[in-house]
Every structure is written in C-alpha cells, then in structure tokens.
Image (cartoon, grey):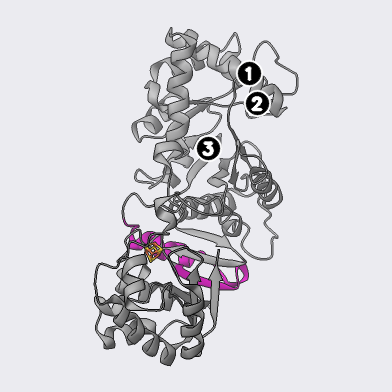
Amino acid sequence: MLANAAESGVIGFMVPGISLESSMKAALLSETRASVFAAAGIHPNEFDPDFPDDPADISEILLRPRVIAVGETGLDFYRDRVPEKLQIEGFKKHTRLAEAFGLTLIAHSRNAEREVLDVLGDDVAVPVIMHCFTGPDDIAQEAADRGYYIGFAGPLTFGGNRRLRDLAGSLPHDRILIETDAPYLSPEPLRGRRNEPSNVRYIADTISEIWDTDPGVTARILMKNSMEALQLGPTRRTDLVYKLYGNIYMNITGRCSNRCRFCIKDRTDGIGGYHLAHHGEPLEGRLESIIDSLSPRMGEELVFCGYGEPTMRPVLLKKLARSASGRGFSVRLNTNGTCLSWLSPSETVSLLEPFDTVSISLNASSREEYNTVCRPADGNAWDRLMEFLELAGRAASVRLTAVRYSGIEMESVKKLAKKLNLPLRIRG
Ligand code: SF4
C-alpha cells in the first residue's frame, strides 16, 4: 500500500487513531517509517461511557515523537451510540490537550457541524482541520474565516456532487486540504472499492479541475497547505514535552548562558525524533497546561531541561517544578550549573527547593578548560559553578555529567568528580 502510494507521488502519510488502541498503533507505526506521522484521538463514536477513568485521556500517546496531531476527535450526532454530552466533554478535553501540546486538531463532524464550531470557539490556539468535510456551506465558510483547513475526500470526485465542488471552488485556496479517509470513501473511478492513500491523486485532479490549474501548481499549493496545517517543514512546531529513557522532559527555553563547542543545538534541531529547537520562548500558560495533563504513571521522573539552560527562566522553572512535585512527580533539574551568574545565592536556594535531583553538566576540570570548551558569557562562570555544586548538594541529590569531546580532558574531570564525591556520568 505504501509502495502504491509512493508510485502515485504520495511522499507522506498522516495516520490518525480512532481509539486508544488504534492511536497507539498509529504512533508505533510512525516510529518505524520516516514518511509516516500519527495523530492520536478517540472518535466520538468510540468513547466508552463505562471507561473506568477518563475516556478522553490520550496524553500519554501525545508524548510520542511522531504524534503531530490530535485526531480523530469531534462530534457525531448521526449515530446515537455515545451520548452527546459525553462526546462534547471528550471533544473539549481533546481540544485542550491539542492546545497544551501545540498539536494540530483533526475534527470530525457529522450532523454536528455547528456544535463543533461552538466547542472550538473562535480563538483555538492550534491549526484545525475540518476532516473529510461535506457541508453545510456556511459552516465551511465560517471555519475558513477562522483560519481552519477544510479537508476534502472521495465525495468531492463523485459526479453528481456539484454542490461540494462549488463549495471547494468558493473557499480560499490556502484553506484546502485533500485526504483519502482510507479505507472508506474511494474516489471516482474506484468508488465502492477499498480505498488507499495512492487514490488521493484523484482528489487532487478534481481540485485541479475546480481551480482550473495545472496539476503541478495544484500539488504545490496543497503540499504547502498540508505542511502548514500539520506544522511540518519550516513551520515545524517545537516539542515542549517529550519522553526519553522512561522519563518525561520539559523543554522550557531555547536560551543558554554558554556556547559549548559540542552543543547539539549547533548541529541538529532535536533528539530522539523530537523537534526541540525553539522559534521563540514557550509561553508560560502552555507549559502549565502541559504539566496539568501529565501524571506520574507516564514516566519515572519529570526532568526540566531546555534546548538551552532552564535556569534562565527561574521564576517559571520554580513554579512548574512545584506544580510537578505537587502532582506526585519526582522532579529533576538538568542544568549547566552557572545560574549564580544571574541569581543570588538565596534566589538559587529557593529555586532548588522543589527538586529531588539536580544533574549538572561539568564538562571541564578547570576554569581555563571550561572557558575554552563551554565559552560562558560570564568569564567567572566556573567559579559560580563550583559554588552552585555546594548549594545544590544541600538541597537535592546531585549528579554530574560530562560530554565525551576531544577538547575535554576526561581523566581530570573524573578526578575532580571523585574529589567532590559526586557520581559522574560520561555521555556520548
Ligand atoms: S550548556 Fe547545554 S545548551 Fe548550553 S551551550 Fe552548552 S550544551 Fe548547549
């Protein structure tokens, strides 16, 4: 199926879930194929009213690296399997999670289009895709006016469906997406057969007819729309929370007081399949919402880090760490240990209060080596780091790390760690 799609010129796939189980399957599939991305959601007809806990809780799956959207979610009043009230509660929760994690929302609506817009409100903070949309026209127009994307699938190609073609033709080009909704809704001329991703080309051809544009131009516009809607490519969103080594990491800043010669930021945008580079500093409210949606069952420790130095946002860091500790997490700080360059000792002691563990990047055995390799903004940062070790040791369990790098004399670093009587982990 993927090979067929590749032959048709399909270069990427968005695989949504409709239940906890299928969402996890989609997430795992996406981790085995570079061209596949996943969405996690529970279809409104799949909510289980008897679910013992929270039937809409998908947050654990949202932590996975290739999950870039929340969906399918939404409202479906066509069938009465799940009470409307429960559907609305679930959809609200999914919308909140999408906003907290910064993920695109893929909204299903059937006989409930107005209600879907009502739940979303007019200032939802993430891209919204009205998935497999078939009407009504005024809802599509309102959704497009709000900046949502309107997804068209096989029904657009059906010969008798003049209204849907007119609708697609009336919307701004930059709001339109195409999709298959496979295995359902095969387009003409394959109607009635099992649908698959390669068939998306028939929908693209229909858009070309409607727009009266060259297929190459149509493909370029639709590709750009897809990248923007799913926050990929140049518009790639930053993962502010991610799961690695059994722990949950919170990426709270892109700023750093050092310019280490080995810094990963200079070479790549992230690790472990996560995109960690920041376009700007993440908003406090978003980070707080993320903490609120996490639970200690999801990971052993909650680690505050950054694609930078987290203590550069001390007030926020302390607030978030307190909140995480209050939720029952064991809380760790990963730091370069130089915050005494911008915080007083009493501010530092107060900052460290919620942390169980502090992991400090040592990366040198002397001030000269530190200044050469880590290039701190403060030329006395090494002295501040040594003072910080003392303060941190009084507040929390302290461990050291050092990066294996040709400019670092590792034997001397090991000796210093031994002298300080602190465990040292050497990182690759
Ligand atoms: S302290 Fe960390 S984030 Fe900052 S420059 Fe060094 S390696 Fe990069």
Return the residue at label 1: 8
Q: Give the extent of the magenta segment.
A: 281-304
Vertical relation: 335 (above or below) 252: below
**Mark 3 and mark 2: span between their CA atoms?**
27 Å
Mark 1 secondary-structure assignment: loop
Amino acid type of the residue that numbered disc 2 sits on in the rendered structure: Pro
Quarter, ligand 1: bottom left
In which quadrant of the rendered view does residue 118 lie?
Answer: top left
Do the CB atoms of the residues marked 3 and 2 lie less than 8 Å apart?
A: no
- Classify the position of the N terminus by image quarter: top right
Residue 116 placement, left or right of 85: left
Q: Residue 19 at x, y = what percent?
A: 67, 48
Residue at 38 percent of width and 27 percent of height: 141
Mark 3 secondary-structure assignment: loop
Amino acid type of the residue that numbered disc 1 sits on in the rendered structure: Ser
Of the two numbered discs 1 and 3 on the same chain, state the one appearing first in sequence.
Answer: 1
Label of residue 407 in the image: none
Do the CB atoms of the residues marked 2 and 1 lie less than 8 Å apart?
A: yes
In which quadrant of the rendered view does residue 390 lie?
Answer: bottom left
Of the two numbered discs 3 and 2 on the same chain, state the one appearing first in sequence.
Answer: 3
Residue at 59 percent of width and 39 percent of height: 77
